[in-house]
Amino acid sequence: MIDIMKIHLVSGFLGSGKTTAIISTSKALMAKGMKVGVITNDQGKFLVDTHFMRLNDIPAVEVNGGCFCCNYGDFNKSLEQITQEIQPDVVFAESVGSCADIVATVVKPLMEFKTAHEEDTTLTTFTDARLLKIYLEGGDLPFQDNVIYIFEQQIQEAGILVVNKMDLLADHLLSELLERTSQRFPEKQILPLVSLTPESVTPWLEGLQSTLQYASTPLNISYKLYGSGEQELAWYDAQLRVESGTQSAVTWVQDFLGLVIQHIRQAGIPIGHLKFLVSDDVRYQKLSLVSGDTAHLIEVDQPEKWGERIELTINARLECSQEEIQQLFQKCFALSADETKTKVTVFAEEAFHPGFPNPTYRFA
Ligand SMILES: Nc1nc2c(ncn2[C@@H]2O[C@H](COP(=O)(O)OP(=O)(O)OP(=O)(O)O)[C@@H](O)[C@H]2O)c(=O)[nH]1
Ligand SMILES: [Mg+2]
């Protein structure tokens, strides 16, 4: 057995606020002198979230190229690595936002192979309060039914259900939403949360001490539906460098982001999570757009302060085909080629659908 620490698995739909909450909570714990490690996870290979954790001085290792369930060996190696490197008191493991069935495929193997103690392991599912509200009221979420199936299954297996981004709902709607949530999921610990700061995540930190850790019965999940839901989603990841020409690099980045959002909106493509990491030698910023956000622009802070050379990482998760997502970005690159001599170098890019979920272990 790895001489473990607490392991908090963090699940929830794309863009629900997992990374934000983990960063805020890690900062709160680190300020109290605790050692924290994070394992990030994605189907892709160059991840905004991992970079962003590290830029926030939070030790992070990543399991990439597939979810924890399908790469349990890599997940276990990452746990060993982080244990050896920093001997953490607490590990947060954030699963990719299209992943479900974590109890059977990650929690149970952790117990079965005696890697972790039951009382030290939790599973929290994050939901965006705006999406949860629509879902519980029987409204139309902006996704296909089999994608919504994943959203439902993630909630179903939570021990702790975080209703996140409560600050984005009007006050008079909050208590009604919480009441509806408790009625629908009476067996879960329901935590309203704002994840944005170390101070605001205290309810989650306290919730993690509870004994109601995760649904004791693994999901009765249809992999056919779950897999088909993942197939509706397309990933586009890219890493590029932008160097100023006659206009600043940051202006190009800002215009490019606007163009991408405009084209997605025009095509009516549902957004899972559109995330960008912008950095130069001195500063960095993560920019995000998720389903529920109505903005037509995401803005780089203090554009006048950015350097001549900017690194841009793109992680886009949309409900469309692989061809559509690739063409959309290609079109935006082509439209952004201008006469300002801005030099844009794309180091790596890939567009794909997540593979069919095929867990390494499944203990039901
Ligand atoms: N207003 C508000 N925004 C939040 C809150 N939590 C997260 N966000 C925003 O939601 C967006 C997505 O947050 P992330 O933490 O990246 O979401 P995620 O669940 O890690 O996303 P994936 O890893 O792509 O599945 C970002 O723009 C965050 O700033 C919150 O409590 N309030
Ligand atoms: Mg994340």
Image (tube, helix red, strand yellow):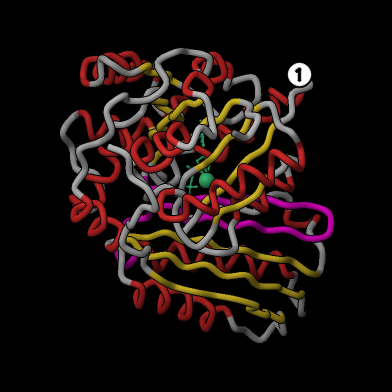
Instruction: State which quarter of the image contains the C terminus.
Output: top left
Quarter of the image holding residue 358?
Answer: bottom left
From the image, give the main secondary structure of the stretch colored magenta: strand
241 shown above or below 71: below
Residue in front for this viewpoint, 73 or 241: 73
Image coordinates for residue 263, horizontal then vertical, percent: 40, 68
- Residue 353 is a magenta residue: no
Image coordinates for residue 180, horizontal then vertical, percent: 24, 18
308 shown above or below 289: below
The residue labelled by disc 1 is 32
Residue in front for this viewpoint, 69 or 12: 69
Residue in front for this viewpoint, 296 or 152: 152
What is the magenta range? 266-291
Q: Residue at x 72, y 47 (%)?
A: 54
For label 1, count other residues whose C-alpha is less than 10 Å away and answer few (under 14), some (14-19) or many (20+).
few
Q: Residue at x 43, y 40 (%)?
A: 106
- The amino acid at mark 1 is Lys
Quarter of the image holding residue 79?
Answer: top right
363 shown above or below 313: above
> Quick check: 186 left or right of 201?
left
Please tell me whether mark 1 sits on a helix, a strand or a loop.
Answer: loop
Image coordinates for residue 316, horizontal then vertical, percent: 47, 61
